[in-house]
Image (cartoon, rainbow, N blue to C red):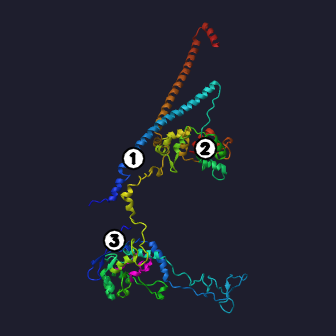
Amino acid sequence: MTTQQLRPIVSVFPIKGKVKTIKQVPLPSVFSAPIRPDVVRFVHTNMAKNNRQAHAVSTTAGEQTSATSWGTGRAVARIPRVKGSGTGRSGQAAFGNMCRGGRMYAPKKVWRKWHRKINTNQKRYAVCSAIAATAVTPLVMSRGHRVNKLPELPLVVSDQLQSLTKTRQAVKFLKFIGAYRDVEKVIRTKKTRVGQGKYRNRRHVLRKGPMVVYARNLGIKKAFRNIPGVETASVYTLNLLKLAPGSQMGRFIIWTESAFKLLEDIYGSWEKPSKFKSGFYLPRPVMVNTDVERIIKSDQVQTVLRNRRPRSRKYGKKIQRADPYEDMSVMVKLNPYYKTKLQKQKELDEKNKKERKEIVDKSRKEYEDWLYFSEEEEEEEEEGSDEDREIEVLSDEN
Amino acid sequence: MSKQVPETIKKQVKRSFNSKEVKKEKNEKRVKLLKEIQSKAFKRAEKYEKEYLEQEQKLVELKQKALKEGSFYREPEPKLAFIIRIRGIVGVPPKPRKILQLLRLRRIYSGVFIRLNKSSLRMLHFIDPYVTWGYPDVETVRALIYKRGHARVNHQRKIIDSNEMIYDKLQKYDIVCMEDLVHEIYTVGKNFKHANSFLWAFKLKPPVGGFSTVKKSFVNKGEHGNREQYINTLVKKMI
């Protein structure tokens, strides 16, 4: 079902002596449950409402007057006003939420729905997600836990931890395993609460430190009780509000070996249901293999894809182009014949010009010739004999 | 220490459709095609020049012949018109509005070519007060397409900056270059529809020197309606 059919091995550490692996246990299937912050957030916000205490405003608050409106015509607002006289209170506005000493808008009632029902499966889904997140170091670190010095996450420790009775022993163990840095953080950042909770018996605010999960309480509860920030929990009753405080997944958990092993039974797997939660199987992830990039790049996918369509860059760019009638290179690109055309036109013009010139020259010459000959004729006219003159005179007349 | 190239990237490069070899091949093909297109463009432009010249000369010949015989030569009715919208979009009644839309004259000073037949003449009749139109000559058609010709490509208006653009779209109608396009439009050939719809509606500038009055028809010393060959001078002022 999952990519993790082979379950990885987790080391079990002792509680004192040397930090070395004394045993190895397989990772329970819960840690491969899908990590769903959206589910956790939803369940957390609703679960957190369940430890609220009812509160309300007094039913009679602001209503304990017999105020009546004065009506119109008195140059005052029409709000009900306190009856009577002889006191400053008389004539004052009453009842409205806007009035001083009036009842609030929509007075809070005790029968407000304080608690929320959440579907059991959703609750279990959230818890599985939260448990899975405790094994993811980046998530634990981003939650703010100081886990740099730990030998391993998830941190599983020998069952001897369950038999600790003294706080001193507990602290020694935490220091030994490298978890004390988280406790130090808690101690260092203890502050007075901001707001009115400080004088309502909630004076100090502490961070959350490591959580110790056990299978059997043989003194462990009392041993860790007084260490600031550290919480203990039985593996049978893991609380989402503790696993993902503030709906932020990745609590730093220290598991005892038997608690760790019990997780497989309590939450089951995808093949085997839980032994304690009837009919419950681990939630299935939407994607089995989330390495999308690798899937896409794999041979199986790539060989079946069609060719990538080329990005038509020529139509993509906004093309500026000069006016072809001003820029010859643009004109020639569009009409390669243009230059030739111009040349031909030029030749034709020149030819025509030449022809025209010839014609003009010819006709001019003819005219000049005619002019020349007529001059000659006139000269001949003057020089000629009388005999000829008569004839010529006649001819001239003709 | 040499950098290890991840296997996925190696595979990707091998598989890549944009690898250097493929790109090179594609480029070579394209260059070859461009050369072909340009050589065709040259030959066809030459052919069309001759054709236009012959047409002119023929017309003159026939007219002279008719004159000699003492009869008249009736020129064939024009097949092509260029319409320019000269009124804005405010206050146009629905019928002319629709017709202007159909003719792609959606804004003022936009121009389109249109084939003249009975149906289109009827349409022009309705939109006469909003447009001016006439019979463009070759040089006008050329100027419009060269200077203001934009192609409709991928539902976008792109300036025609190479014959390749025309080839891509109109190759199947045997129009591969600018001169082909001009010829198809001017002579209203078989694929006039496709050539014309390839062209986006021309966006012209307001005329240099202005209009006299758009409210009157051209015949009445105004501007709208049919102005036959005077459309050419108008386009010169608006191009």
Q: Is residue B178 above or below residue A21?
A: above
- Residue A235 on the magenta segment: yes
Letter of the chain that mark 3 sits on in the rendering: A
Confirm whether residue A256 shows in the render: no
Q: Which residue is mark 2?
A: B83
Crowding around mark 1 (Cα neighbors within 10 Å: few <14, some 14 to 19, many 20+) is few
Segment tinted magenta in the rendering: A232-255
Find residue B3 and report its image quarter.
bottom left
Which corner quadrant holds the C terminus of chain B?
Answer: top right
Confirm whether residue B97 shows in the render: yes
Which corner quadrant holds the N terminus of chain B?
Answer: bottom left
Residue type, numbered disc 2 = Ile
* Callout 3: SS: loop
- Residue B116 on the magenta segment: no
Q: Which residue is mark 3?
A: A7
Crowding around mark 3 (Cα neighbors within 10 Å: few <14, some 14 to 19, many 20+) is some
Disc on res. B26:
1
Residue B150 in percent (x, y) is at: 52, 47
- Is mark 2 in CB contact (under 8 Å) with mark 3? no
Q: Is residue A56 above or below residue B208?
A: below
Residue type, numbered disc 1 = Lys
Letter of the chain that mark 2 sits on in the rendering: B
